[in-house]
Image (spheres, rainbow, N blue to C red):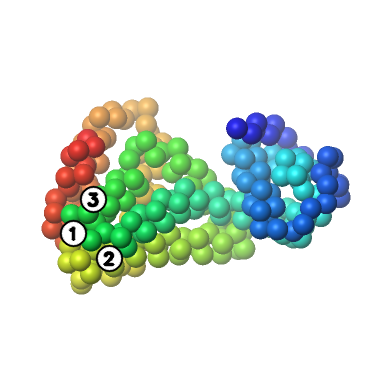
Amino acid sequence: MRSLPSTQAPIDSETGSEGAQDAPATKDSRQRILEETIIAIDAGGESSVRLTQVSRRAGVTQGLIAYHFGDRESLVSEAQATRFSEVNDHLLKELAAAAERARSAEELTELLEELIESVLTVEAGVERERRVSALAATLSRPDARALVSTRLRTLHELIEMIVNRAQSLGIMRTDLDPTAVSALISTVSLGCIAVDLDSDHLDTEQARTVRSQMVTVLLKGLGLNHGVAGLRRSG
């Protein structure tokens, strides 16, 4: 595991970075730059993002950072947008692919339970807080806000794919708009931050019970025909 960068408020505006050598502008180098920027933000906030340190850890020159992102502000904006979406993006892609392979109502119902369970669970609080902090950092930046909006649209489309599949298999009401369903799930997910912030006064076992009941109600409201067996097994 890579060590986390130290928190330092000033930004180094030098044009080169110690130890880095010129490298081809590839998708891989762009991803490394983005990953190191996210590590810096997670460790100490945006003020800890130093271009010399990012370039050194990514193994590129600052010129390559400029090539890929333009300037530090654009780099930080994209890093925040990625922090907002990356975990849910991976999860939803896996679930959407699994939904396409589902051949029975029971199999897909379990996937839907897993989707809703994953966004409501107490244990997901750390990642939820990370997403909310990234979202807050982008609201006053038009370019960053546009990036988050694009990422959120992608997440919603993945949920919509799962909902469409559920409707095609006859286990979800077809009069419900998939876009509206995906927006509801996303809203409930982010709204759970209110519980996360008061976690010191929250009984985890009671939270699990309430969460399970909430999922039951939500699934019934969506017209699912097969109960919540998956939740009972995991509870």
- The single residue placed furthest to the bottom in the displayed view is 175
Q: Secondary structure at mark 3?
A: helix
Residue assigned mark 2: 165
Quarter of the rendering containing residue 1: top right
The reply to whether residue 35 is in sight is: yes
Q: Earlier in the sequence, mark 2 or mark 3?
A: 3
| Badge number at residue 110 | 3
In the rendered image, residue 13, in percent from the top left (x then y), is placed at 83, 47
Q: Earlier in the sequence, mark 2 or mark 1?
A: 1
In this rendering, position of residue 5 left or right of residue 167: right
In the rendered image, residue 59, in percent from the top left (x then y), is placed at 75, 44
Quarter of the rendering containing residue 64: bottom right
Which is more toward the observer, 100 or 89? 100
Three-letter amino acid code of the residue under disc 2: Arg
* Label 2, label 3: how far apart the Cα atoms are: 13 Å
Which is more toward the observer, 64 or 48? 64
* Label 2, label 1: how far apart the Cα atoms are: 10 Å
199 versus 86 height, above or below: above
Task: Look at the image and tell me in which quarter the C terminus lies.
Answer: top left
Which is more toward the observer, 42 or 202? 42
Residue assigned mark 1: 105
In the rendered image, residue 231, in percent from the top left (x then y), is placed at 21, 42
